[in-house]
Amino acid sequence: MLFLGTFLTRLEYLQIQKGEAFLNRSENNVLEKQIIFSDRGIIYDRNMIELAWNKKEVNIPIAIRTYLAPGFSHLLGYVSYPMQDKAGNYWQSEFIGKDGLEKQYNELLKGQNGSKIVEIDARKEIHSENIVNAPKRGTDIITTIDSRIQTELHTLIKNLAQSNFFTGGVGILIDIRNGEILASVSFPEYDSEILSLGQDTKKIESYLNDKRKVFLDRTISGLYTPGSIVKPFFAFGALVEGIIDPYKKILSTGSISIPNPYFPDQKTVFKDWKAHGWVDMREALAVSSDVYFYEIGGGFEEQKGMGIVNIEKYAKLFGIGEKTGIDLPDEKGGVIPSPLWKIKNFNGELWRIGDTYHTAIGQYGFQVTPMEMTRAVSAMANYGSLVTPHYILGDIEKEKNILKIDFKKEYFDVVHEGMRQSVLVGTSSLLNVSYVQVAAKTGTAQLGVNKNKVNSWIIGFFPYENPQYAFSIMMEAGPSSNSVGASSIMRQLLDWMSINTPEYF
Protein backbone atom coordinates (compact mmCIF):
# COMPACT_ATOMS: atom_id res chain seq x y z
CA MET A 1 0.00 0.00 0.00
CA LEU A 2 2.91 2.37 0.79
CA PHE A 3 4.51 1.69 -2.60
CA LEU A 4 1.17 2.14 -4.40
CA GLY A 5 0.50 5.40 -2.55
CA THR A 6 3.90 6.75 -3.47
CA PHE A 7 3.38 5.81 -7.11
CA LEU A 8 -0.05 7.46 -7.31
CA THR A 9 1.21 10.63 -5.63
CA ARG A 10 4.06 10.88 -8.17
CA LEU A 11 1.65 10.16 -11.02
CA GLU A 12 -0.71 12.93 -9.83
CA TYR A 13 2.24 15.36 -9.71
CA LEU A 14 3.39 14.51 -13.21
CA GLN A 15 -0.02 14.25 -14.91
CA ILE A 16 -2.07 16.91 -13.15
CA GLN A 17 0.13 19.48 -11.42
CA LYS A 18 2.93 19.48 -14.08
CA GLY A 19 1.03 17.91 -16.92
CA GLU A 20 0.79 21.04 -19.04
CA ALA A 21 4.45 21.98 -18.56
CA PHE A 22 5.70 18.55 -19.54
CA LEU A 23 3.34 18.51 -22.52
CA ASN A 24 4.87 21.80 -23.75
CA ARG A 25 8.36 20.43 -23.23
CA SER A 26 7.59 17.27 -25.15
CA GLU A 27 6.12 19.27 -28.02
CA ASN A 28 8.79 22.03 -28.18
CA ASN A 29 12.02 20.24 -27.23
CA VAL A 30 14.12 18.68 -29.93
CA LEU A 31 16.99 16.24 -29.99
CA GLU A 32 20.07 17.47 -31.81
CA LYS A 33 23.21 15.64 -32.79
CA GLN A 34 26.17 17.87 -31.97
CA ILE A 35 29.88 17.61 -32.69
CA ILE A 36 32.38 17.08 -29.90
CA PHE A 37 35.53 18.59 -31.33
CA SER A 38 38.70 16.59 -30.89
CA ASP A 39 41.84 18.22 -29.50
CA ARG A 40 44.50 18.71 -32.15
CA GLY A 41 47.86 17.06 -31.46
CA ILE A 42 50.57 19.18 -29.84
CA ILE A 43 53.76 20.00 -31.74
CA TYR A 44 56.90 19.87 -29.57
CA ASP A 45 60.54 20.75 -30.12
CA ARG A 46 63.25 18.15 -29.52
CA ASN A 47 63.37 19.08 -25.80
CA MET A 48 59.58 18.75 -25.37
CA ILE A 49 58.94 22.49 -25.42
CA GLU A 50 55.46 23.18 -26.84
CA LEU A 51 55.55 24.89 -30.23
CA ALA A 52 51.83 24.58 -31.07
CA TRP A 53 49.13 23.66 -28.57
CA ASN A 54 45.42 24.08 -27.70
CA LYS A 55 44.04 26.68 -25.30
CA LYS A 56 40.50 26.28 -23.92
CA GLU A 57 38.33 29.42 -23.94
CA VAL A 58 35.13 30.01 -21.94
CA ASN A 59 31.93 29.70 -23.99
CA ILE A 60 33.83 28.55 -27.11
CA PRO A 61 33.16 24.92 -28.15
CA ILE A 62 36.56 24.51 -29.76
CA ALA A 63 40.03 25.10 -28.40
CA ILE A 64 42.08 27.99 -29.78
CA ARG A 65 45.25 26.91 -31.59
CA THR A 66 48.19 28.71 -29.98
CA TYR A 67 51.75 29.04 -31.25
CA LEU A 68 55.18 29.80 -29.86
CA ALA A 69 56.30 33.06 -31.44
CA PRO A 70 58.08 34.83 -32.96
CA GLY A 71 60.32 32.85 -35.29
CA PHE A 72 58.24 29.74 -35.97
CA SER A 73 55.42 30.72 -38.33
CA HIS A 74 56.78 29.35 -41.62
CA LEU A 75 57.88 26.18 -39.89
CA LEU A 76 54.62 25.51 -38.04
CA GLY A 77 52.15 27.09 -40.47
CA TYR A 78 48.57 27.75 -39.38
CA VAL A 79 45.11 26.12 -39.42
CA SER A 80 41.62 26.79 -40.69
CA TYR A 81 39.03 26.51 -37.89
CA PRO A 82 35.70 24.61 -38.16
CA MET A 83 33.19 26.85 -39.95
CA GLN A 84 29.41 27.37 -39.61
CA ASP A 85 26.76 28.76 -41.89
CA LYS A 86 24.25 31.39 -40.75
CA ALA A 87 21.96 28.71 -39.31
CA GLY A 88 24.74 27.43 -37.10
CA ASN A 89 25.42 24.26 -39.10
CA TYR A 90 29.04 23.26 -39.56
CA TRP A 91 29.99 22.96 -43.23
CA GLN A 92 33.62 22.42 -42.17
CA SER A 93 33.67 20.29 -39.06
CA GLU A 94 37.45 19.90 -38.56
CA PHE A 95 40.62 21.91 -38.14
CA ILE A 96 42.57 21.85 -41.40
CA GLY A 97 46.32 22.55 -41.57
CA LYS A 98 46.98 25.22 -44.18
CA ASP A 99 50.77 25.60 -44.19
CA GLY A 100 53.98 24.30 -42.63
CA LEU A 101 53.99 21.26 -40.36
CA GLU A 102 50.30 21.83 -39.61
CA LYS A 103 49.57 21.05 -43.27
CA GLN A 104 52.24 18.41 -43.82
CA TYR A 105 51.13 16.32 -40.82
CA ASN A 106 47.45 17.27 -40.73
CA GLU A 107 46.22 13.66 -40.82
CA LEU A 108 48.25 12.82 -37.71
CA LEU A 109 47.46 15.99 -35.81
CA LYS A 110 43.75 16.39 -36.46
CA GLY A 111 42.32 13.47 -34.45
CA GLN A 112 38.70 12.40 -34.85
CA ASN A 113 35.62 14.32 -33.76
CA GLY A 114 33.00 12.71 -31.52
CA SER A 115 29.27 13.34 -31.24
CA LYS A 116 26.51 13.66 -28.64
CA ILE A 117 22.70 13.80 -28.56
CA VAL A 118 21.43 16.97 -26.88
CA GLU A 119 17.83 17.80 -25.81
CA ILE A 120 17.18 21.53 -26.42
CA ASP A 121 14.04 23.59 -25.87
CA ALA A 122 12.77 26.53 -27.90
CA ARG A 123 14.88 28.92 -25.87
CA LYS A 124 18.03 26.92 -26.77
CA GLU A 125 18.41 25.75 -23.20
CA ILE A 126 19.94 22.30 -22.77
CA HIS A 127 17.92 19.83 -20.72
CA SER A 128 19.99 16.69 -21.23
CA GLU A 129 22.83 15.31 -23.29
CA ASN A 130 24.35 11.90 -23.97
CA ILE A 131 27.66 11.12 -25.65
CA VAL A 132 27.28 8.80 -28.63
CA ASN A 133 30.90 8.72 -29.85
CA ALA A 134 33.81 9.98 -27.78
CA PRO A 135 36.33 12.17 -29.64
CA LYS A 136 39.81 10.83 -30.33
CA ARG A 137 42.62 13.25 -29.64
CA GLY A 138 45.13 14.00 -32.39
CA THR A 139 48.62 12.52 -32.29
CA ASP A 140 51.40 14.68 -30.84
CA ILE A 141 54.56 15.12 -32.90
CA ILE A 142 58.07 15.79 -31.62
CA THR A 143 60.21 17.80 -34.00
CA THR A 144 63.96 17.98 -34.50
CA ILE A 145 63.93 21.73 -33.80
CA ASP A 146 65.78 23.23 -30.86
CA SER A 147 63.48 26.15 -30.03
CA ARG A 148 66.25 27.97 -28.15
CA ILE A 149 68.46 28.18 -31.23
CA GLN A 150 65.50 28.88 -33.50
CA THR A 151 64.38 31.84 -31.38
CA GLU A 152 67.86 33.35 -31.16
CA LEU A 153 68.58 32.91 -34.87
CA HIS A 154 65.30 34.61 -35.78
CA THR A 155 66.11 37.54 -33.50
CA LEU A 156 69.56 37.99 -35.07
CA ILE A 157 68.24 37.84 -38.64
CA LYS A 158 65.34 40.18 -37.90
CA ASN A 159 67.57 42.77 -36.23
CA LEU A 160 70.15 42.78 -39.02
CA ALA A 161 67.49 42.93 -41.76
CA GLN A 162 65.84 45.92 -40.14
CA SER A 163 69.04 47.80 -39.27
CA ASN A 164 70.91 47.21 -42.55
CA PHE A 165 68.04 47.31 -45.04
CA PHE A 166 67.93 43.69 -46.14
CA THR A 167 64.60 42.54 -47.62
CA GLY A 168 64.67 39.38 -45.54
CA GLY A 169 66.82 36.52 -44.37
CA VAL A 170 67.19 32.78 -43.86
CA GLY A 171 69.05 30.65 -41.34
CA ILE A 172 69.32 26.86 -41.24
CA LEU A 173 71.25 24.53 -38.93
CA ILE A 174 71.27 20.78 -39.68
CA ASP A 175 72.75 17.60 -38.24
CA ILE A 176 74.90 16.23 -41.09
CA ARG A 177 74.74 12.69 -39.72
CA ASN A 178 71.02 12.11 -40.15
CA GLY A 179 69.38 15.23 -41.64
CA GLU A 180 67.69 16.50 -38.46
CA ILE A 181 67.00 20.23 -38.75
CA LEU A 182 67.82 22.06 -35.53
CA ALA A 183 66.78 25.51 -36.73
CA SER A 184 64.96 26.79 -39.79
CA VAL A 185 64.24 30.53 -39.86
CA SER A 186 62.57 32.55 -42.61
CA PHE A 187 62.14 36.31 -42.14
CA PRO A 188 59.83 38.18 -42.49
CA GLU A 189 57.03 36.00 -41.20
CA TYR A 190 53.32 36.16 -40.46
CA ASP A 191 51.50 35.58 -37.17
CA SER A 192 50.10 32.03 -37.21
CA GLU A 193 47.32 32.81 -34.73
CA ILE A 194 46.12 35.84 -36.69
CA LEU A 195 45.88 33.80 -39.89
CA SER A 196 44.18 30.89 -38.13
CA LEU A 197 41.47 33.03 -36.55
CA GLY A 198 41.08 35.21 -39.65
CA GLN A 199 39.49 38.07 -37.72
CA ASP A 200 42.18 40.77 -37.94
CA THR A 201 41.47 41.70 -41.56
CA LYS A 202 43.67 44.80 -41.50
CA LYS A 203 46.70 42.82 -40.41
CA ILE A 204 46.05 40.10 -42.97
CA GLU A 205 45.67 42.73 -45.69
CA SER A 206 49.01 44.23 -44.65
CA TYR A 207 50.59 40.79 -45.13
CA LEU A 208 49.13 40.55 -48.62
CA ASN A 209 50.40 44.01 -49.58
CA ASP A 210 53.88 43.61 -48.08
CA LYS A 211 56.43 43.70 -50.93
CA ARG A 212 58.81 41.55 -48.89
CA LYS A 213 56.63 38.47 -49.55
CA VAL A 214 55.65 37.62 -46.00
CA PHE A 215 54.04 34.31 -46.97
CA LEU A 216 57.16 32.98 -48.74
CA ASP A 217 59.06 30.34 -46.80
CA ARG A 218 62.49 31.39 -47.96
CA THR A 219 64.16 28.22 -46.65
CA ILE A 220 62.53 25.90 -49.20
CA SER A 221 60.65 28.10 -51.69
CA GLY A 222 62.92 31.13 -52.05
CA LEU A 223 65.19 31.00 -55.11
CA TYR A 224 68.36 33.08 -54.83
CA THR A 225 71.56 33.74 -56.76
CA PRO A 226 74.20 31.84 -54.75
CA GLY A 227 77.42 33.57 -55.75
CA SER A 228 80.68 32.10 -54.48
CA ILE A 229 79.17 29.51 -52.12
CA VAL A 230 79.06 27.09 -55.10
CA LYS A 231 82.86 27.21 -55.53
CA PRO A 232 83.66 24.32 -53.12
CA PHE A 233 81.55 21.96 -55.20
CA PHE A 234 83.17 22.97 -58.47
CA ALA A 235 86.62 22.68 -56.88
CA PHE A 236 85.67 19.12 -55.95
CA GLY A 237 84.49 18.44 -59.51
CA ALA A 238 87.73 19.80 -60.97
CA LEU A 239 89.71 17.39 -58.77
CA VAL A 240 87.59 14.39 -59.73
CA GLU A 241 87.83 15.24 -63.44
CA GLY A 242 91.60 15.78 -63.22
CA ILE A 243 91.27 19.35 -64.50
CA ILE A 244 93.88 20.72 -62.13
CA ASP A 245 96.30 19.63 -59.44
CA PRO A 246 95.29 21.21 -56.11
CA TYR A 247 98.83 22.58 -55.70
CA LYS A 248 98.98 24.29 -59.10
CA LYS A 249 98.84 28.07 -58.77
CA ILE A 250 96.84 30.40 -61.01
CA LEU A 251 97.61 34.11 -61.24
CA SER A 252 94.83 36.59 -60.49
CA THR A 253 95.80 40.11 -61.52
CA GLY A 254 92.22 41.22 -60.97
CA SER A 255 90.66 40.00 -64.22
CA ILE A 256 91.00 37.91 -67.37
CA SER A 257 90.15 39.02 -70.90
CA ILE A 258 89.01 37.08 -73.97
CA PRO A 259 88.13 38.18 -77.53
CA ASN A 260 84.73 39.86 -77.86
CA PRO A 261 82.51 37.71 -80.15
CA TYR A 262 80.73 40.80 -81.47
CA PHE A 263 83.72 43.17 -81.75
CA PRO A 264 86.88 41.16 -82.62
CA ASP A 265 89.15 44.15 -82.06
CA GLN A 266 87.95 44.49 -78.47
CA LYS A 267 88.25 42.35 -75.34
CA THR A 268 85.60 41.04 -72.99
CA VAL A 269 86.80 41.44 -69.42
CA PHE A 270 85.82 39.15 -66.52
CA LYS A 271 86.72 40.75 -63.23
CA ASP A 272 87.83 39.27 -59.95
CA TRP A 273 86.67 41.08 -56.82
CA LYS A 274 90.32 41.95 -56.20
CA ALA A 275 93.80 40.94 -57.37
CA HIS A 276 94.86 37.87 -55.37
CA GLY A 277 98.21 37.05 -56.98
CA TRP A 278 99.20 33.39 -57.31
CA VAL A 279 96.71 31.04 -55.59
CA ASP A 280 96.32 27.27 -55.48
CA MET A 281 92.97 25.56 -54.91
CA ARG A 282 92.94 25.87 -51.12
CA GLU A 283 93.96 29.52 -51.28
CA ALA A 284 91.44 30.22 -54.06
CA LEU A 285 88.67 28.89 -51.81
CA ALA A 286 89.98 30.86 -48.84
CA VAL A 287 90.13 34.21 -50.63
CA SER A 288 87.29 33.38 -53.07
CA SER A 289 89.23 34.12 -56.26
CA ASP A 290 86.88 34.49 -59.21
CA VAL A 291 89.70 34.26 -61.76
CA TYR A 292 90.72 30.84 -60.42
CA PHE A 293 87.19 29.50 -60.87
CA TYR A 294 86.72 31.18 -64.26
CA GLU A 295 89.74 29.24 -65.45
CA ILE A 296 88.96 25.82 -63.96
CA GLY A 297 85.31 26.25 -64.91
CA GLY A 298 85.56 27.44 -68.51
CA GLY A 299 89.26 27.21 -69.27
CA PHE A 300 91.70 30.00 -70.15
CA GLU A 301 94.81 29.91 -72.32
CA GLU A 302 96.71 26.74 -71.27
CA GLN A 303 94.43 25.93 -68.31
CA LYS A 304 91.77 23.38 -69.22
CA GLY A 305 88.22 23.96 -67.92
CA MET A 306 85.51 21.61 -66.67
CA GLY A 307 82.93 22.92 -69.13
CA ILE A 308 79.28 23.62 -68.48
CA VAL A 309 78.26 19.96 -68.71
CA ASN A 310 80.54 18.98 -65.83
CA ILE A 311 79.63 22.10 -63.87
CA GLU A 312 75.99 21.01 -64.01
CA LYS A 313 76.97 17.40 -63.26
CA TYR A 314 78.78 18.20 -60.01
CA ALA A 315 76.22 20.72 -58.86
CA LYS A 316 73.51 18.07 -59.22
CA LEU A 317 75.75 15.44 -57.62
CA PHE A 318 75.50 17.48 -54.40
CA GLY A 319 71.73 17.99 -54.82
CA ILE A 320 72.04 21.60 -56.04
CA GLY A 321 69.25 22.57 -58.42
CA GLU A 322 66.90 19.85 -57.10
CA LYS A 323 64.36 19.44 -54.33
CA THR A 324 65.71 17.96 -51.11
CA GLY A 325 62.64 15.85 -50.30
CA ILE A 326 62.06 17.71 -47.05
CA ASP A 327 58.79 17.13 -45.15
CA LEU A 328 57.23 20.54 -45.79
CA PRO A 329 54.80 21.57 -48.55
CA ASP A 330 55.68 23.78 -51.55
CA GLU A 331 59.40 23.06 -51.83
CA LYS A 332 61.05 24.29 -55.03
CA GLY A 333 64.11 23.10 -56.89
CA GLY A 334 66.81 25.47 -58.06
CA VAL A 335 68.05 26.38 -61.54
CA ILE A 336 71.49 25.59 -62.99
CA PRO A 337 72.15 27.54 -66.19
CA SER A 338 72.90 25.38 -69.23
CA PRO A 339 72.88 25.73 -73.04
CA LEU A 340 69.38 24.25 -73.22
CA TRP A 341 68.16 26.59 -70.44
CA LYS A 342 69.58 29.57 -72.35
CA ILE A 343 67.89 28.54 -75.60
CA LYS A 344 64.54 28.29 -73.82
CA ASN A 345 64.86 31.53 -71.87
CA PHE A 346 66.72 33.79 -74.32
CA ASN A 347 65.01 33.17 -77.66
CA GLY A 348 67.40 30.55 -78.96
CA GLU A 349 70.65 32.37 -78.06
CA LEU A 350 73.80 30.25 -78.13
CA TRP A 351 75.84 29.44 -75.05
CA ARG A 352 79.15 31.30 -74.80
CA ILE A 353 82.31 30.85 -72.74
CA GLY A 354 81.38 33.93 -70.69
CA ASP A 355 78.20 32.17 -69.59
CA THR A 356 80.32 29.29 -68.30
CA TYR A 357 82.58 31.71 -66.43
CA HIS A 358 79.64 33.39 -64.71
CA THR A 359 78.01 30.06 -63.84
CA ALA A 360 81.28 28.80 -62.32
CA ILE A 361 81.12 31.60 -59.72
CA GLY A 362 77.40 31.17 -59.00
CA GLN A 363 76.10 34.07 -61.06
CA TYR A 364 74.18 34.41 -64.35
CA GLY A 365 70.86 32.50 -64.09
CA PHE A 366 72.01 30.31 -61.19
CA GLN A 367 69.32 30.01 -58.49
CA VAL A 368 69.22 27.86 -55.36
CA THR A 369 67.16 27.47 -52.22
CA PRO A 370 68.92 27.82 -48.85
CA MET A 371 67.81 24.27 -47.95
CA GLU A 372 69.52 22.91 -51.09
CA MET A 373 72.76 24.57 -50.10
CA THR A 374 72.49 23.35 -46.51
CA ARG A 375 72.10 19.81 -47.76
CA ALA A 376 74.97 20.24 -50.22
CA VAL A 377 77.43 21.55 -47.62
CA SER A 378 76.34 18.73 -45.30
CA ALA A 379 77.40 16.21 -47.95
CA MET A 380 80.70 18.01 -48.36
CA ALA A 381 81.24 17.95 -44.58
CA ASN A 382 80.37 14.28 -44.06
CA TYR A 383 82.44 13.00 -46.99
CA GLY A 384 79.67 12.34 -49.45
CA SER A 385 76.43 11.35 -47.69
CA LEU A 386 73.57 13.36 -49.18
CA VAL A 387 71.06 13.23 -46.30
CA THR A 388 67.36 14.07 -46.46
CA PRO A 389 66.49 17.11 -44.30
CA HIS A 390 63.51 16.48 -42.03
CA TYR A 391 61.60 17.88 -39.06
CA ILE A 392 60.28 14.81 -37.19
CA LEU A 393 62.52 13.34 -34.51
CA GLY A 394 63.24 9.68 -35.17
CA ASP A 395 61.90 9.66 -38.75
CA ILE A 396 63.59 6.41 -39.76
CA GLU A 397 62.37 6.53 -43.36
CA LYS A 398 63.91 9.96 -43.95
CA GLU A 399 67.11 9.06 -42.11
CA LYS A 400 67.61 5.98 -44.29
CA ASN A 401 67.11 7.98 -47.49
CA ILE A 402 70.75 8.83 -48.15
CA LEU A 403 72.52 9.13 -51.50
CA LYS A 404 76.25 8.41 -51.55
CA ILE A 405 78.79 10.57 -53.41
CA ASP A 406 81.52 7.95 -53.67
CA PHE A 407 84.86 9.61 -54.49
CA LYS A 408 88.28 9.71 -52.87
CA LYS A 409 88.47 11.12 -49.36
CA GLU A 410 91.47 13.25 -50.40
CA TYR A 411 89.23 15.32 -52.72
CA PHE A 412 86.94 16.16 -49.83
CA ASP A 413 89.97 16.92 -47.65
CA VAL A 414 91.29 19.54 -50.09
CA VAL A 415 87.95 21.36 -50.06
CA HIS A 416 87.71 21.06 -46.26
CA GLU A 417 91.17 22.58 -45.91
CA GLY A 418 90.28 25.43 -48.25
CA MET A 419 87.12 26.18 -46.27
CA ARG A 420 89.08 26.05 -43.02
CA GLN A 421 91.65 28.48 -44.44
CA SER A 422 88.74 30.74 -45.37
CA VAL A 423 88.02 31.01 -41.64
CA LEU A 424 91.65 31.30 -40.55
CA VAL A 425 92.95 33.83 -43.10
CA GLY A 426 90.26 34.41 -45.72
CA THR A 427 86.79 35.80 -46.34
CA SER A 428 85.16 33.86 -43.46
CA SER A 429 87.56 35.10 -40.79
CA LEU A 430 84.70 36.42 -38.66
CA LEU A 431 84.03 32.79 -37.68
CA ASN A 432 87.57 32.27 -36.32
CA VAL A 433 86.52 31.66 -32.72
CA SER A 434 88.34 29.98 -29.86
CA TYR A 435 85.64 27.59 -28.62
CA VAL A 436 84.97 25.61 -31.86
CA GLN A 437 86.79 25.14 -35.16
CA VAL A 438 84.62 26.11 -38.12
CA ALA A 439 85.03 25.63 -41.89
CA ALA A 440 83.07 28.01 -44.12
CA LYS A 441 82.61 29.69 -47.48
CA THR A 442 81.13 33.13 -48.04
CA GLY A 443 79.27 34.40 -51.07
CA THR A 444 78.15 37.80 -52.27
CA ALA A 445 75.76 37.55 -55.21
CA GLN A 446 75.14 40.75 -57.14
CA LEU A 447 71.55 41.48 -58.15
CA GLY A 448 69.87 43.55 -60.85
CA VAL A 449 71.17 45.50 -63.81
CA ASN A 450 72.76 48.16 -61.63
CA LYS A 451 74.19 45.58 -59.20
CA ASN A 452 73.37 47.86 -56.27
CA LYS A 453 71.81 45.01 -54.27
CA VAL A 454 73.43 41.81 -53.02
CA ASN A 455 72.54 38.52 -51.40
CA SER A 456 75.00 37.89 -48.58
CA TRP A 457 75.69 34.17 -47.93
CA ILE A 458 77.76 31.98 -45.69
CA ILE A 459 77.72 28.17 -45.58
CA GLY A 460 79.88 25.85 -43.52
CA PHE A 461 80.20 23.18 -40.86
CA PHE A 462 81.61 22.47 -37.39
CA PRO A 463 83.50 21.07 -35.55
CA TYR A 464 86.17 20.95 -38.26
CA GLU A 465 87.97 17.77 -37.12
CA ASN A 466 84.79 15.76 -36.57
CA PRO A 467 81.98 17.49 -38.49
CA GLN A 468 78.50 17.15 -37.00
CA TYR A 469 76.52 20.26 -37.97
CA ALA A 470 76.22 22.35 -41.12
CA PHE A 471 74.70 25.76 -41.62
CA SER A 472 73.50 28.21 -44.25
CA ILE A 473 72.76 31.87 -43.65
CA MET A 474 71.45 34.17 -46.39
CA MET A 475 70.58 37.83 -46.06
CA GLU A 476 68.46 38.92 -49.00
CA ALA A 477 68.81 41.94 -51.27
CA GLY A 478 70.71 44.37 -49.09
CA PRO A 479 72.62 47.44 -50.29
CA SER A 480 75.90 46.52 -52.02
CA SER A 481 77.61 49.07 -49.76
CA ASN A 482 76.82 46.97 -46.66
CA SER A 483 79.86 45.83 -44.73
CA VAL A 484 77.78 43.60 -42.44
CA GLY A 485 76.04 40.47 -43.70
CA ALA A 486 75.46 36.77 -43.21
CA SER A 487 78.84 36.12 -41.55
CA SER A 488 77.97 38.42 -38.66
CA ILE A 489 74.74 36.48 -38.04
CA MET A 490 76.60 33.17 -37.82
CA ARG A 491 79.29 34.66 -35.58
CA GLN A 492 76.71 36.02 -33.16
CA LEU A 493 74.85 32.69 -33.16
CA LEU A 494 78.05 30.76 -32.43
CA ASP A 495 78.87 33.14 -29.58
CA TRP A 496 75.40 32.68 -28.15
CA MET A 497 75.50 28.88 -28.52
CA SER A 498 78.87 28.67 -26.79
CA ILE A 499 77.17 30.03 -23.66
CA ASN A 500 73.61 28.73 -23.91
CA THR A 501 73.88 25.44 -25.87
CA PRO A 502 77.53 24.34 -25.54
CA GLU A 503 76.52 20.69 -26.03
CA TYR A 504 76.56 21.26 -29.80
CA PHE A 505 80.28 21.98 -29.71
Image (spheres, grey):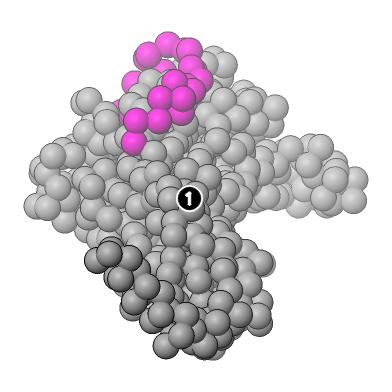
Q: Which residue is mark 1?
A: 133
Judge whether residue 164 is colored magenta. Answer: no
Q: Which quadrant does the C terminus fall into?
A: top left
Q: Give 401 or 63, whichever is nearer the viewer.
A: 63
Work out which residue is located at the far right of the displayed protein and give it. 348
Q: Which quadrant does the N terminus fall into?
A: bottom left
* Residue 159 visible within the image: yes
Judge whether residue 410 is colored magenta. Answer: yes
Q: Quadrant of residue 312?
A: top right
Residue flagged by tag 1: what amino acid is it? Asn
* Residue 200 visible within the image: no
Determine the residue positioned at 51% across, 76% down. Answer: 120
Residue 151 drawn at (x, y percent): 27, 60
Q: Give 224 or 56, whichever is nearer the viewer.
A: 56
Magenta stretch: give its range.
Answer: 393-422
Determine the residue positioned at 52% across, 88% down. Answer: 20
Labels in figure, total: 1
